[in-house]
Amino acid sequence: MMTAAFFLDRDGTINEDTGYVSHPDELMIYPWTAEAIRLINESGAKAIIITNQSGIARGFYSEETLVEIHDRLKEELGREGAFLDGIYYCPHHPRIGDRRYRIVCECRKPAMGLLNQAVADHKIEIDRSWVIGDKASDIRMAAQAGVRAALVLTGYGSETIARRDLWPCAPEIVSENLLLAVRLILTRG
Ligand SMILES: [Mg+2]
Ligand SMILES: [Zn+2]
């Protein structure tokens, strides 16, 4: 059976974008995030994170540490009855950092590699799915993939909307934060 999905950006959408979250203790999840993800869970849609983590290429933290950060995220969400169906990350950067990670890849947003992988892994119906994020790269990935998009004003969202003339396309929804975006999308049907 095919299912809808919410492809969620991480930094600036789910948790505060503090630069590069390099340790589980630096993860500051927004107070409304668990409720937003719980609503997604209850709707039957998949909640899937798609995140650029070039901090790995830059040598700020390892993939092992990223796993620990995501374990903390899942644990804190779980305490409030919310769960993620998947977390997909890009550790690369096209120009910076360690040789292993310094490549022009298919997975760094706005490229669609991670989204395509998630769609295949979870049998997702693109037409019923949404991308929610705070940067133009989130909106551009959505547009390329033919997925509807919501911009949140947390994180870099206010800067993103101030430079909207630079976007190739506009998001369908602009919301104060993740919870309001999810509520709006779910009530619209
Ligand atoms: Mg972000
Ligand atoms: Zn990548």
Image (spheres, grey):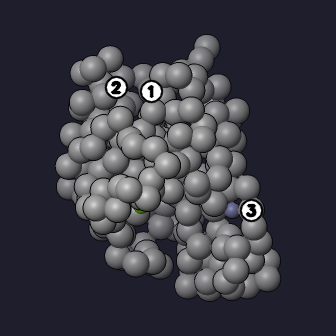
Direction from residue 125 to residue 6 in the image, left or right:
left
For residue 125, above or below residue 33: above
> Which mark is drawn over residue 42?
2
Q: Secondary structure at mark 1?
A: loop
Q: Quadrant of ligand 1?
A: bottom left
**Disc 2 residue type?**
Glu
Q: Are marks 3 and 2 in contact (CB under 8 Å)?
A: no
**Disc 3 residue type?**
Cys
Direction from residue 20 to residue 116 in the image, left or right:
right
C-alpha span from label 1 to label 2:
8 Å
Is label 3's Cβ within 8 Å of ligand 2?
Answer: yes
| Quarter holding residue 6 | top left
Q: Residue at x 26, y 55 (%)?
A: 153
C-alpha span from label 1 to label 3:
28 Å
Direction from residue 113 to residue 66 in the image, left or right:
left
**Residue 17 seen in the current view:** yes
Q: Quadrant of the N terminus?
A: top right
Q: Residue at x 67, y 40 (%)?
A: 116
Q: Secondary structure at mark 3?
A: loop
Which residue is identified by label 3?
105
> Which mark is drawn over residue 45?
1
- Sooner in the amino-acid sequence: mark 3 or mark 2: 2
